[in-house]
């Protein structure tokens, strides 16, 4: 007897959200199957990779492979231009970690000026990531959204504490995309999506940042949240959870001990750079198979591997 597989394509689907403008714009979401279940139905759009570039430029690159990929770059703008040549990258994530009041405390004006320079230097979609300071981030997101009108950027992220100001400016006044950040909890994720929609932000202008974790560091909580969100969105047609998922992988994986402890301290662990690359690859692959529609990464070698991983499953 011939085997007739039973297909499981859902009547519901994830919102298709366009990032960027022009010929290099890209679309995330749109699928009506579980992640990479192409044997059930084709995925409308393949998952994407964004490259994280810090506002500190070359000084933020801690590994030889990262530095080699951007050899000759004297500024953040140079790095952005060079990034367009790297394989697998669909967007640029400009990380304003230097704006942290407890660190360099760069001004909002400095951040906006850099964002404008980056937008002029590349046609790739731009994601703006803040410094994790609620008040400073809200200012940066609002001013960058105004300065980059028409670029269809993503601001990452609006939280419970600042969703009103970020949603009103980025999502409503300037028609940008808003990342809704929750703390690895499906109920909090849904609540924030509902609040943003009630505020007046269109559902098609919202992406979800469900939180992130490096594999081995409580990742099972993120894994279960990803699974539950996708199941509710597709199987239960929960429209408040049908926003595409964006996961910042780089900020987690390059800050754990496996990616930081020197080879002299733990020679049995092997190459420090290889450890970091492997942690980033493992985390990104887990997030993508769990349901992330876009992952933010940092090391070019890890990005190349994940790009091949995505291609092989599509």
Image (tube, helix red, strand yellow):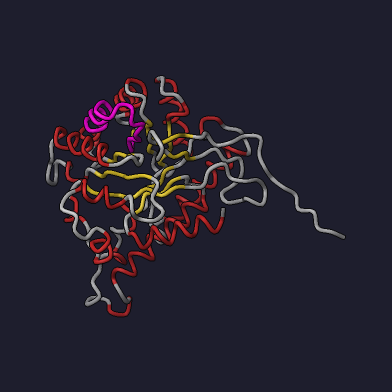
Judge left or right: residue 3 versus residue 36: right
Q: Residue furthest right?
A: 1
- Residue 178 sits in quarter: top left
Judge left or right: residue 92 versus residue 233: left
Q: Position of residue 216 (x, y in %)?
A: 41, 61
Judge left or right: residue 160 versus residue 5: left
Q: Residue furthest front?
A: 23
Position of residue 223 relative to residue 234, above or below, is below
Let me know if residue 147 is in the magenta part.
Answer: yes
Residue appearing at x 26%, y 32% in the figure: 141
Viewer-nearest residue: 178 or 110: 110
Q: Position of residue 117 (x, y in %)?
A: 21, 38
Q: Position of residue 229 (x, y in %)?
A: 52, 41
Residue appearing at x 52%, y 56% in the figure: 311
Pick the quarter of the image with the N terminus.
bottom right
Viewer-nearest residue: 252 or 75: 75
Q: Position of residue 214 (x, y in %)?
A: 38, 57
What segment carries the magenta color? 138-157
* Numbered marks: total: 0
Let me know if residue 80 is in the magenta part.
Answer: no
Residue appearing at x 34%, y 58% in the figure: 253
Judge left or right: residue 63 versus residue 291: left
Viewer-nearest residue: 74 or 265: 74
Residue appearing at x 35%, y 55% in the figure: 86
Position of residue 178 relative to residue 283, above or below, is above
């Amino acid at each position: 007897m011939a085997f007739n597989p039973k297909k499981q394509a859902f009547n519901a689907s994830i919102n298709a959200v366009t990032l960027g403008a022009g010929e290099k714009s890209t679309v995330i979401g749109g699928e009506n199957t579980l992640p990479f279940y192409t044997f059930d139905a084709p995925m409308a759009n393949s998952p994407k990779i964004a490259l994280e570039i810090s506002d500190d430029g070359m000084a933020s690159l801690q590994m030889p492979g990262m530095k080699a990929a951007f050899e000759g770059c004297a500024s953040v703008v140079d790095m952005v231009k060079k990034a367009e040549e790297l394989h697998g990258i669909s967007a640029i994530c400009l990380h304003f970690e230097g704006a942290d009041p407890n660190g360099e405390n760069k001004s909002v004006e400095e951040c906006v000026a850099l964002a404008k320079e980056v937008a002029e230097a590349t046609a790739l979609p731009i994601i703006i990531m803040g410094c994790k300071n609620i008040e400073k981030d809200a200012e940066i997101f609002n001013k960058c959204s105004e300065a980059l009108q028409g670029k269809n950027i993503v601001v990452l992220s609006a939280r419970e504490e600042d969703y009103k100001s970020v949603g009103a400016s980025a999502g409503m006044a300037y028609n940008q995309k808003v990342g809704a950040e929750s703390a690895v909890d499906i109920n909090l994720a849904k609540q924030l999506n509902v609040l943003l929609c009630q505020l007046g932000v269109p559902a098609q202008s919202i992406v979800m940042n469900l939180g992130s974790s490096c594999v081995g560091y409580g990742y099972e909580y993120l894994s279960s949240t990803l699974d539950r969100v996708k199941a509710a969105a597709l199987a239960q047609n929960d429209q408040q959870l049908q926003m595409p998922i964006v996961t910042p992988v780089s900020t987690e994986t390059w800050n754990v001990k496996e990616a930081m402890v020197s080879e002299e301290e733990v020679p049995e662990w092997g190459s420090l750079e290889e450890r970091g690359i492997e942690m980033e690859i493992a985390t990104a692959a887990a997030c993508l198979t769990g349901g992330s529609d876009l992952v933010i990464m940092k090391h070019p070698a890890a990005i190349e591997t994940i790009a091949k991983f995505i291609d092989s499953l599509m």
